[in-house]
Protein backbone atom coordinates (compact mmCIF):
# COMPACT_ATOMS: atom_id res chain seq x y z
CA UNK A 1 0.00 0.00 0.00
CA UNK A 2 2.80 2.40 0.93
CA UNK A 3 4.62 1.46 -2.20
CA UNK A 4 1.58 2.18 -4.40
CA UNK A 5 1.08 5.51 -2.67
CA UNK A 6 4.71 6.50 -3.26
CA UNK A 7 4.50 5.51 -6.95
CA UNK A 8 1.27 7.51 -7.40
CA UNK A 9 2.78 10.59 -5.71
CA UNK A 10 5.88 10.29 -7.90
CA UNK A 11 3.75 10.01 -11.06
CA UNK A 12 1.60 12.94 -9.99
CA UNK A 13 4.72 15.02 -9.34
CA UNK A 14 6.14 14.16 -12.78
CA UNK A 15 2.87 15.06 -14.52
CA UNK A 16 2.61 18.33 -12.60
CA UNK A 17 6.20 19.33 -13.42
CA UNK A 18 5.92 18.24 -17.04
CA UNK A 19 2.70 20.14 -17.66
CA UNK A 20 4.16 23.24 -16.03
CA UNK A 21 7.10 23.10 -18.41
CA UNK A 22 4.82 22.64 -21.38
CA UNK A 23 2.57 25.48 -20.28
CA UNK A 24 5.55 27.80 -19.90
CA UNK A 25 7.07 26.97 -23.27
CA UNK A 26 7.16 30.10 -25.42
CA UNK A 27 4.67 30.14 -28.22
CA UNK A 28 6.17 29.97 -31.67
CA UNK A 29 5.54 33.17 -33.52
CA UNK A 30 5.67 32.59 -37.22
CA UNK A 31 6.18 35.77 -39.15
CA UNK A 32 3.99 35.79 -42.22
CA UNK A 33 6.17 35.89 -45.29
CA UNK A 34 5.40 38.61 -47.77
CA UNK A 35 4.22 36.59 -50.74
CA UNK A 36 5.36 37.65 -54.16
CA UNK A 37 2.42 38.58 -56.36
CA UNK A 38 1.66 35.91 -58.95
CA UNK A 39 2.62 36.84 -62.53
CA UNK A 40 -0.27 36.45 -64.98
CA UNK A 41 -0.66 37.04 -68.73
CA UNK A 42 -3.23 38.74 -70.91
CA UNK A 43 -3.10 39.19 -74.67
CA UNK A 44 -5.09 41.08 -77.26
CA UNK A 45 -5.22 44.30 -79.25
CA UNK A 46 -4.24 47.69 -77.83
CA UNK A 47 -7.28 49.96 -77.53
CA UNK A 48 -5.68 52.66 -75.38
CA UNK A 49 -2.11 53.63 -74.54
CA UNK A 50 -0.36 56.38 -72.59
CA UNK A 51 3.40 55.91 -72.67
CA UNK A 52 4.76 55.18 -69.21
CA UNK A 53 1.32 55.43 -67.56
CA UNK A 54 -1.17 52.83 -68.77
CA UNK A 55 -2.17 50.40 -71.50
CA UNK A 56 -5.66 49.09 -72.25
CA UNK A 57 -5.93 45.74 -74.06
CA UNK A 58 -9.01 44.01 -75.51
CA UNK A 59 -9.19 40.28 -76.28
CA UNK A 60 -11.15 38.70 -79.12
CA UNK A 61 -13.85 37.60 -76.63
CA UNK A 62 -14.38 41.33 -75.80
CA UNK A 63 -12.77 41.09 -72.36
CA UNK A 64 -10.88 44.30 -71.71
CA UNK A 65 -8.22 45.06 -69.09
CA UNK A 66 -6.36 48.23 -68.16
CA UNK A 67 -2.83 47.98 -66.77
CA UNK A 68 -0.80 50.59 -64.91
CA UNK A 69 2.80 50.97 -66.03
CA UNK A 70 5.91 51.80 -63.99
CA UNK A 71 9.50 52.65 -64.80
CA UNK A 72 10.29 48.94 -64.38
CA UNK A 73 7.80 47.86 -67.08
CA UNK A 74 9.75 46.29 -69.95
CA UNK A 75 8.48 46.94 -73.48
CA UNK A 76 9.60 44.88 -76.47
CA UNK A 77 8.47 46.41 -79.75
CA UNK A 78 6.53 49.53 -80.70
CA UNK A 79 3.22 49.89 -78.86
CA UNK A 80 0.47 51.61 -80.88
CA UNK A 81 -3.29 51.42 -81.30
CA UNK A 82 -4.59 48.04 -82.58
CA UNK A 83 -1.16 46.37 -82.19
CA UNK A 84 -1.32 42.78 -80.90
CA UNK A 85 0.38 42.53 -77.51
CA UNK A 86 1.00 40.10 -74.70
CA UNK A 87 1.09 41.66 -71.23
CA UNK A 88 2.59 40.04 -68.14
CA UNK A 89 1.16 41.63 -65.00
CA UNK A 90 0.89 41.40 -61.22
CA UNK A 91 -1.81 42.51 -58.82
CA UNK A 92 -0.24 44.90 -56.32
CA UNK A 93 -2.86 46.00 -53.82
CA UNK A 94 -5.78 47.43 -55.78
CA UNK A 95 -3.69 48.03 -58.91
CA UNK A 96 -2.93 45.79 -61.87
CA UNK A 97 0.65 46.57 -62.88
CA UNK A 98 2.20 45.53 -66.20
CA UNK A 99 5.67 44.03 -65.72
CA UNK A 100 6.36 43.43 -69.42
CA UNK A 101 4.67 44.14 -72.74
CA UNK A 102 5.61 42.21 -75.87
CA UNK A 103 4.36 43.47 -79.23
CA UNK A 104 3.62 40.71 -81.76
CA UNK A 105 5.32 41.09 -85.11
CA UNK A 106 2.95 40.47 -88.00
CA UNK A 107 0.58 37.61 -87.30
CA UNK A 108 -0.40 36.35 -83.88
CA UNK A 109 2.05 33.70 -82.69
CA UNK A 110 0.51 30.23 -82.60
CA UNK A 111 -2.17 30.98 -85.19
CA UNK A 112 -1.66 29.05 -88.42
CA UNK A 113 -2.70 30.08 -91.88
CA UNK A 114 -5.11 27.36 -93.01
CA UNK A 115 -4.09 27.81 -96.66
CA UNK A 116 -0.40 27.38 -95.99
CA UNK A 117 0.85 23.80 -96.12
CA UNK A 118 -2.69 22.58 -96.80
CA UNK A 119 -2.87 19.20 -98.47
CA UNK A 120 -5.81 18.40 -100.68
CA UNK A 121 -7.35 15.01 -100.10
CA UNK A 122 -7.55 12.84 -103.21
CA UNK A 123 -11.00 12.29 -104.58
CA UNK A 124 -12.31 8.78 -104.18
CA UNK A 125 -14.96 7.01 -106.14
CA UNK A 126 -17.34 5.75 -103.49
CA UNK A 127 -19.85 4.35 -106.02
CA UNK A 128 -17.86 1.13 -106.52
CA UNK A 129 -17.44 0.50 -102.83
CA UNK A 130 -19.24 -2.51 -101.38
CA UNK A 131 -22.06 -1.70 -99.06
Image: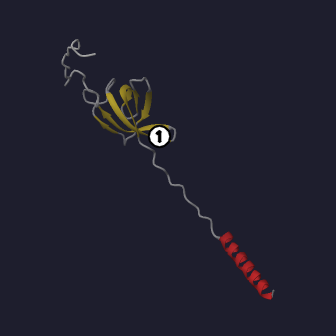
Residue 114: which quarter of the image?
A: top left
- Name the residue beneath numbered marker 1: 91
Q: Which residue of the protein is positioned furthest toward the top in this rendering?
A: 127
- Judged left or right of residue 59, residue 112 is left
Residue 130: which quarter of the image?
A: top left
Q: Which residue of the protein is positioned furthest toward the front in this rendering?
A: 130
Q: Which residue of the protein is positioned furthest toward the right in this rendering?
A: 1
Give residue 102's position: percent from left, percent from top.
Answer: 31, 35
Q: How is the image coloured?
A: secondary structure
Quadrant in which the C terminus appears: top left
Q: Nearer the viewer, residue 92 or 116?
A: 116
Give residue 126's position: percent from left, percent from top.
Answer: 23, 14
- Judged left or right of residue 123, residue 35 is right
Give residue 9's position: percent from left, percent from top.
Answer: 76, 82
Quadrant in which the N terminus appears: bottom right
Q: Nearer the viewer, residue 18 or 51?
A: 18
- Judged left or right of residue 76, residue 36 is right
Residue 20: which quarter of the image?
A: bottom right
Q: Nearer the viewer, residue 131 or 110?
A: 131
Q: Is residue 11 above or below residue 83?
A: below
Amino acid sequence: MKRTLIVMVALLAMVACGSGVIAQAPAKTAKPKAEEPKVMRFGGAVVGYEAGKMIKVKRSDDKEMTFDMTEATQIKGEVKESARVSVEYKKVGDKIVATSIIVAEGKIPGKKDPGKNAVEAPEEDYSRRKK
